[in-house]
Amino acid sequence: MKVSLLDDLRRQNPIVFNISNFVTVQDVANGINAIGASPIMSEEVDEADEMVQMSQAVCLNLGAFTTPQVHQIKVTGQLANQYHKPLVVDPVAVGAVKYRAQVAAELFQAFQPDVLRGNAGEIAALAGINWQAKGIDAGEGAADLVTIAETCAKKQKCTVILSGPTDVITDGTRTVQVINGTTLFQTHVGSGDMLSSIVAAFCAIEDDYFEAAQTACLVFAAIGQRVAQADPQMGAGTFIIKLMDALQQTTVAQIEAVAAYE
Ligand SMILES: Nc1ncnc2c1ncn2[C@@H]1O[C@H](COP(=O)(O)OP(=O)(O)O)[C@@H](O)[C@H]1O
Ligand SMILES: Cc1ncsc1CCOP(=O)(O)O
Ligand SMILES: [Mg+2]
């Protein structure tokens, strides 16, 4: 685990191009900015070529697309592949909404993600494993999380992050589990979207996307854990404000001191 990638990220300040969703776009932009990268968002397909070329990574969030946006997402994903820019996809609620699963399958015919980041319900759906997803949330199921993530990675031919109380990160061969975190992440809509775009920021500065993905998960979860531990009475409102501060201010040494993974 190369936690020092966080210092590289802050030094390099890479541009991360996001097609976000209208629910969480501001948290995603501020999260990227706070951690030390440079966010840019777009809803216009005509600027996609220029935007992808000037970016060091692309994050496509499938959280709330319209039909024109599906076209924009498809073109942007294809451009990311064409220009060899790392491509992270967040398949929001593909386990809960059949239409979303169908659109995601069509998109993955058109371009190849480098990293897929979702909760258990989303990653199980993309792995073809039975699971009861609940809207944007993970839901419930009996299957083993490591098996789900590794099956998804092999099927989709990319690095997969199955996030939750424990994050499972795998490229189908190498697998790591990040134990850090806090239940306060669940109280804030957009925690997963923020993580996906922060994964893209790490992929911008590390060519081994499995390495980038596991480091991003550890950094995000450990920072959230430190914030929660500082005030056991903290609620959802204060958490996002303190989390933004901590994304900006937490050092590599502070993360290494609490890091828990296997
Ligand atoms: N119960 C939990 N305990 C600790 N960390 C959690 C918990 N649930 C989610 N997280 C963390 O929240 C972040 C977002 O993950 P998740 O909630 O799975 O995404 P989504 O919001 O897309 O469902 C990740 O960093 C994950 O580790
Ligand atoms: C509530 C909601 N509805 C569509 S997208 C979205 C946000 C999902 O954010 P996250 O998966 O990060 O909790
Ligand atoms: Mg999500």
Image (cartoon, helix red, strand yellow):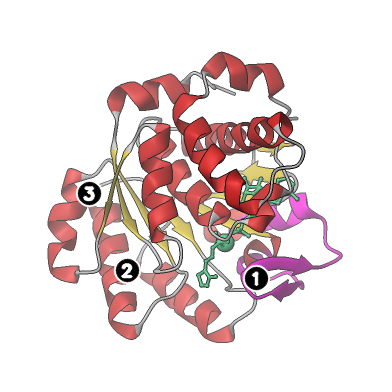
Q: Nearer the viewer, residue 136 or 141?
A: 136
Residue depicted at x 75% and y 42%: 233
Q: Is the residue under label 3 in contact with that under label 1 (CB below 8 Å)? A: no
Q: Quadrant of residue 15?
A: top left
Q: Amino acid at mark 2?
A: Ile
Q: Quadrant of the N terminus?
A: top right
Which residue is under mark 3?
A: 83
Q: Which label is found at residue 73?
A: 2
- Does the stretch in magenta take in 151? yes
Q: Give the x, y percent position of residue 239.
A: 61, 45
Residue depicted at x 86% and y 65%: 142
Q: Residues within 10 Å of mark 1 (few under 14, many from 20)?
A: many
Label 1, label 2: how many angstroms apart (C-alpha)? 20 Å
Residue found at the far right of this picture: 142
Magenta span covers which residues? 124-152
134 to the left or right of 82: right
Q: Quadrant of ligand 2?
A: bottom right
Q: Quadrant of residue 262?
A: top right
Q: Give the x, y percent position of residue 191.
A: 56, 52
Residue depicted at x 47% and y 70%: 63
Which residue is under mark 1?
A: 125
Q: Which label is found at residue 98?
A: none
- In front: label 1 or label 2: 2
Q: Residues within 10 Å of mark 3 (few under 14, many from 20)?
A: few
Label 2, label 3: how many angstroms apart (C-alpha)? 15 Å
* Dot 3: element: loop
Q: Nearer the viewer, residue 155 or 74?
A: 74
Which label's residue is closer to the chain start, 2 or 3? 2
Which label's residue is closer to the chain start, 1 or 3? 3
Q: Give the x, y percent position of residue 146.
A: 75, 49
* Dot 1: element: helix
146 to the left or right of 3: right
